Image (cartoon, rainbow, N blue to C red):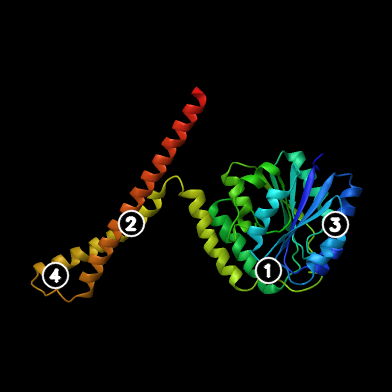
Amino acid sequence: MPPHLSVLLPAYNEAENLAELVPEIAKVLESAGIDHEVVVVDDGSTDGTRRVMGGLRSPTVRSIRLRRNSGKSAALAVGVEQVRGEIVVLMDADGQDDPEEIPRLLAHLEAEGLDLVTGRRSVRNDRFVKRTTSKLYNGATARVTGVPGRDFNSGLKVMRRELAESVELYGELHRYIPVLAVWNGFRVDELDVEHHERRHGRSKFGRARFWRGFLDLVTVKFLTTYTARPFHLFGGIGFLIGLVGSGLLAWMAVERIAGRSIGTRPALQAGVLLVVVAVQMVSLGLLGELMVNLRRRRTLEASAEGDLA
């Protein structure tokens, strides 16, 4: 019989932490009487993680090894395909997430009829720079997407299997699981949890993580807002650019009527360029609308054929 709960840990060079963390997770869940499994995705580690997981392997502990480091989102996507539980718990393998919080998050999920509960780190044991950038990131995410939350990127999450399988993860989109879940119609919430200092080793995320996260925020905003109406984005940008370009050309027309030479004026060249770009943006938006419309028609036709069958 498949277990009720699956704990999924993506790990990259976390051998020392896994040796301590995996037995602790098993102990906590066994004490709580929760039928479970622990699945570790070794994301191309080179520090002996494979050897450590070989020693920890049991009927309730499995490991999946990726040949090269592919990133957290890719590791989670592979793990979600392999877990068997109806409830999926995501945890980081650095030991900062407390296994004792899993039963609390699970109880909140069940009691409130939720689909996802994020462990909100009320007191973060991280460096000042990391705490500050994370606060800025969470504030920007909530403001841009309209999804309430204060700790979107917490590694500790409890979710239903249906949600885990419906969210497509690539790039750095693991940071936006709550946003993607809300967009797909699931109910989400946050619950304060304990957060510890990293047990062993160093963080695997550098400064580039912040900029990658910002670019992925733009991606998420587009996917969740403009996928079904691309003309609202491209057409809006096009009309705005066209308005500026038309204003410059009108100004040049007035100058020409007044008898002044405009052939070498930068404003004339800028006006023409902006109008051309505006036409291209509007055309791109209309093509996007056409593609969306065709996709909808095909979906409706396929649905009608299925009903008739």
Proximity of marks 4 and 3: CB atoms separated by less than 8 Å? no
Q: Could you tell me how far apart the alpha carbons at marks 3 and 2 are, in whole angstroms?
A: 55 Å
- The residue identified by callout 3 is 57
**Mark whose residue sits in front, 4 or 2:** 2
The circle on residue 131 is 1
Q: Residue shown at 79%/67% (left/top)?
A: 49
Q: Amino acid at mark 4?
A: Glu
Q: Amino acid at mark 1?
A: Arg
Dot 3 crowding, Cα within 10 Å, few <14, some 14–19, many 20+: some
Q: Could you tell me how far apart the alpha carbons at marks 2 and 1 are, in whole angstroms?
A: 39 Å
**Mark whose residue sits in front, 3 or 2:** 3
Secondary structure type for disc 3: loop
Note whether residue 148 is visible. Answer: no
Proximity of marks 3 and 2: CB atoms separated by less than 8 Å? no
The circle on residue 255 is 4
Q: Is residue 232 above or below residue 263?
A: above
Secondary structure type for disc 1: helix
Proximity of marks 2 and 1: CB atoms separated by less than 8 Å? no
Q: Position of residue 176 (x, y in %)?
A: 61, 55
**Mark whose residue sits in front, 4 or 1:** 1
Q: Amino acid at mark 3?
A: Arg
Q: Position of residue 10 (x, y in %)?
A: 72, 60
User: Closer to the N terminus: mark 4 or mark 1?
Assistant: 1
- The residue identified by callout 2 is 281
